[in-house]
Image (cartoon, rainbow, N blue to C red):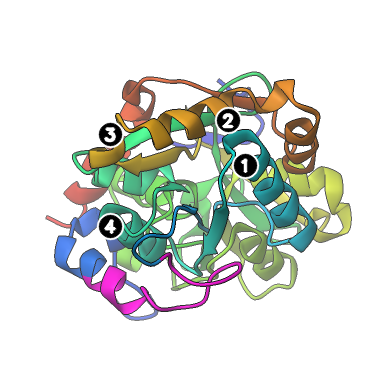
Amino acid sequence: MFRHADLPFGKVATGELAVVGASTLNRRRWLRGASSCAGAAVLPGSIAVAGDTSLRFGLTPVFLTSDLDLLAELKGYLVEAMGRPVQLISRRTYQEITALLVSRQLDAAWICGYPFVAYRADLELVAVPVWNGQTLYQSYIIAGQNVDAEGLKDLSGTVHAYSDPDSNSGYLVTRAALVELGVRPASFFRQTFFTYGHRNVIRAVAAGLADSGSVDGYVYEVLRETEPDLVKTTRVIARSEWLGFPPVACPMAEAGSASTARLRNALVRMSEIPSGRKVLNLLKLDGFRNEPATLFDGIAGKLRIALRGLE
């Protein structure tokens, strides 16, 4: 449940533009996405063909920025640390990257905790980012400065921006909170829409296209520091409890492979190597850490609550 923002840290209806996404656990929809996007563009190149030894590493909108310098630094570090070619493969939605990962068309990907728990039987943790000393983050509800609201319950009948239907902080947490409030998520807001990016949620609220939005707290705090003009006309009105930070995961079948072990080592040692520290500085992260899958039990609980709202 969301807490009011001043407390310490600790759609399938009229006007709603999308359905629950991964919370329906519709495996066929996700695997259909894998086949439909297998030939789409990557950063750079294409999905590796048979015999290609490149590490195929996927990035979703959980990635803070599409800045080309950052992508180049990340790729350069992974090539250096692993001693093999690397392809960074990006997609617009969480669904597309997760579908590629589950179908083993990617070797690993930086995904969200929501698809990780939804496809727990198919995915294994590689490493989890460390932000401000911990492998946890929060979901924020933000609102425009002129919106008369002090918490989620005050937003009834307004326009709300979500990030992605398969995002934990940008969708699932809010949906679960509405179920806990005893209201129907599909009809609580007058209208909702997906922006397919946490920065885009902030933009929508700042521009008045939405009264409020669900956003990744890590992204919001970093942008408050790096792009203050973007966030200055918004404010945080509620924060969730601490939840597992969006992880790097691999297909379960590759969990014990030498390639996965090298990738895990490269991520965990990133803070020890100058080129790795440069990447971490750009991301405003402390490093990466090995963590048990139980770190994401809180998100799994959110999924169970959200599914109650569909009954």
Q: Sequence-wise, which precedes: disc 2 or disc 3?
A: 2
Q: How many marks on residues?
A: 4
Q: Which mark is residue 301?
A: 3
Q: Nearer the viewer, residue 236 or 223?
A: 223
**Residue 234 is inside the magenta segment:** no
Q: Which mark is residue 78?
A: 1
Q: Which residue is mark 4?
A: 22
Q: Which amino acid lies under the numbered mark 3 shown in the image of this protein?
A: Gly
Q: Main secondary structure of the magenta part?
A: loop
The reply to whether discs 2 and 1 touch (Cβ–Cβ < 8 Å) is yes
Q: Which residue is mark 2?
A: 266
Task: In the rendered view, tell whether residue 272 sits above or below residue 106.
Answer: above
Q: Sequence-wise, which precedes: disc 1 or disc 3?
A: 1
Cα distance, mark 2 to mark 3? Answer: 31 Å
Q: Secondary structure at mark 2?
A: helix
Indicate left or right for 42 with 221 as reference: left
Q: Which amino acid lies under the numbered mark 1 shown in the image of this protein?
A: Leu
Q: Which amino acid lies under the numbered mark 4 shown in the image of this protein?
A: Ala
Quadrant assignment, res 52: bottom left
Q: Sequence-wise, which precedes: disc 4 or disc 1?
A: 4
The reply to whether discs 4 and 1 touch (Cβ–Cβ < 8 Å) is no
Q: Residue at x 71, y 24 (%)?
A: 271
